[in-house]
Image (spheres, rainbow, N blue to C red):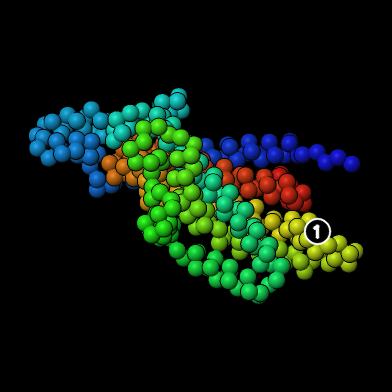
Amino acid sequence: MSHRLPWGPMARMTARRALSAVPVLIAVTFGVFAVAAASPFDPVKAYAGTAGLTASQENLDQLRANLGVDRPLVTRWWDWLTSAVQGDLGVSSVMRMPVADVIGERAGWSLLLATCAFVIAILLGTALGVLAARRPRGALDRCVSSAAYTLEAAPAFWLGLLAIWVFALTLDILPAGGLTDAGSDTVTFGQVATHLVLPAAVLGISQLPWFFLYVRQGVTDALDEDPVRGARARGLSERTVLLGHALRSGMLPMLTLIGSRVPELITGALLVETVFSWPGIAAATVQAATSVDFSLLAALTVLATAAVLLGNLLSDLLYGLADPRVGFDG
């Protein structure tokens, strides 16, 4: 008997989430403009740089008018929003280039880093969680659980600095940061892979404790359920019972964790990119915030919010596929 994927319910859930995301994204953009307008940083002085220290008030006022920051908050927000809907995200005042180009040049590197880190966290967390659940309160369980609780409290930037000190400065086996070797004019796969190891590992390890703890608890509980006990009574091997029965049941809680970890992943990625000078959107985000670059800051915030909403949708879809009792129309 074949099992068909519930494409219809999945599509309806996706459509509902997409419609509900529209007012959220609109509210987020307005919030960004409101917070930026209340910021103590002056976008005109940030744009002018050192020249603004000696510029006359008349020149500063003219520059303020040219940048459009002398207009009312609601007017600036509405103009940006209507242009963004038409595909024009505006021009970044701090980067001196279209916002779409800024994001296009940097988002790919951030996505690469986040994807590799997420894969590391999920695979390593799942493997360690299963091994720990196999022998609760054993030596491996106590050791890994203690390390997980410690890592939960460790900031990502601290882990990054520690990794640089150990692997780049002390052992000198991995580069301390950047995308390519110093003095290199070309970007090669080998250089990118080498420079990606430390930031991806640090970001992945910073997210690992939650996946490990969820899988460990889920598999531990599943091993005490009647279906798993029945599988053991039928004489199935311990490996089959563990991976074929307990792991599938124990993975269900972790699926909801995937979406909830996206905000922390984004925050951690910004810190890790900064520590390792990774050319993602972190530097652009910091510069946009400190320079009150309304257009760039709004676009980056919308991008991060959309990533969080997509992560939540993905976790719900995966949970519905893994457990048909949940469904998609509830």
Q: Where is residue 96 in the image (x, y as percent from the top left)?
A: 29, 30
Drawn side of residue 65 relative to residue 131, left or right? left
Q: In this view, does 147 lie to the left or right of 154?
A: right
Residue 233 in percent (x, y) is at 88, 67
| Residue at left offset 69%, top offset 67% | 133
**Point 89% across, 64% down: residue:** 235
Q: Which of 70 and 84 is in front in this view?
A: 84
Task: Check disc 1 and report its element: helix, strand or loop.
Answer: helix
In the depicted structure, whether residue 190 falls above or below residue 203? above
* Residue 41 screen position, x and y as percent: 24, 45
Q: Where residue 249 sits in the image (x, y, percent)?
A: 74, 58
> What count of labels does the image hold?
1
Front residue of 113/33: it is: 113
Q: Is residue 95 above or below residue 243?
A: above
Q: Can residue 258 be seen in this view?
A: yes
Q: What residue type is labelled 1?
A: Thr
In the rendered image, the vertical position of residue 262 relative to residue 221, given as above or below = above
Which residue is drawn at the image coordinates 86% and 62% (left, top)?
236
Q: Closer to the camera, 166 or 303?
A: 166
**Where does label 1 land, which residue?**
240
Residue 284 in the figure: left or right of residue 17: left
Tell me the quarter of the picture where residue 30 sits.
top left
Q: Is residue 136 left or right of residue 76?
A: right
Residue at the image point whose x is 40% and y is 29% from the top: 101
Residue 72 visible? The answer is no
Q: Quadrant of the N terminus?
A: top right
Q: How crowded is mark 1: few (under 14 residues within 10 Å), some or many (20 or more)?
A: few
